[in-house]
Amino acid sequence: MVTKEFEKKKSKLFKHLKNSSELTEELADEIIDVYGSRGERAIKVIKNNGVRKEEDRWFVQGREDEYEIVQNHCSCYDYVLNIVTGKAGVNMCYHALAKTIRQLLNAD
């Protein structure tokens, strides 16, 4: 279940991302503070150029597969088992988070 505290931190983070043009160390720390290990994995996939946009479609490279991200929805196991059910305490898997970070930074 996503908490009000999480929503506040997420809103603040997304505002900072929108106002930045690159992924700084400070932003990376804030992402990890809000999203934990999912944030770490999202940052890693971004740094490894694992996020791409083709026309209006976003794709993120996972450990074994590439996932198409539609809005903030993903077909990975983490999204289906933990995000949708509210078990994770966050609103996105690392694939969707990586896409969102890139999108907010206008890095597409």
Image (cartoon, helix red, strand yellow):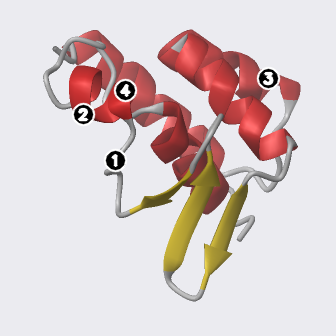
Q: CA distance from mark 1 to mark 3?
A: 30 Å
Q: Amino acid at mark 2?
A: Val
Q: Amino acid at mark 3?
A: Glu
Q: Residue at x 31, y 51 (%)?
A: 73
Q: Nearer the viewer, residue 91 or 64?
A: 64
Query: What kind of element bears circle 2?
Result: helix
Q: Which residue is mark 3?
A: 26
Q: Amino acid at mark 1?
A: Ser
Say whether disc 2 or disc 1 marks the residue closer to the N-terminus. Answer: 1
Image coordinates of residue 92 in percent, x first then y, are 38, 34
Relative horizontal placement of residue 19, taking residue 46 as reference (left or right): left
Q: On residue 75, which mark appears?
A: 1
Q: CA distance from mark 2 to mark 1?
A: 7 Å
Disc 1 + disc 3, Cβ < 8 Å: no
Q: Specify few, some or many for label 2: CA neighbours under 10 Å numbering under 14, 14-19, or 20 or more.
A: some
Q: CA distance from mark 1 to mark 4?
A: 8 Å
Query: What kind of element bears circle 4?
Result: helix
Q: Which residue is mark 4?
A: 78
Q: Which residue is mark 2?
A: 80
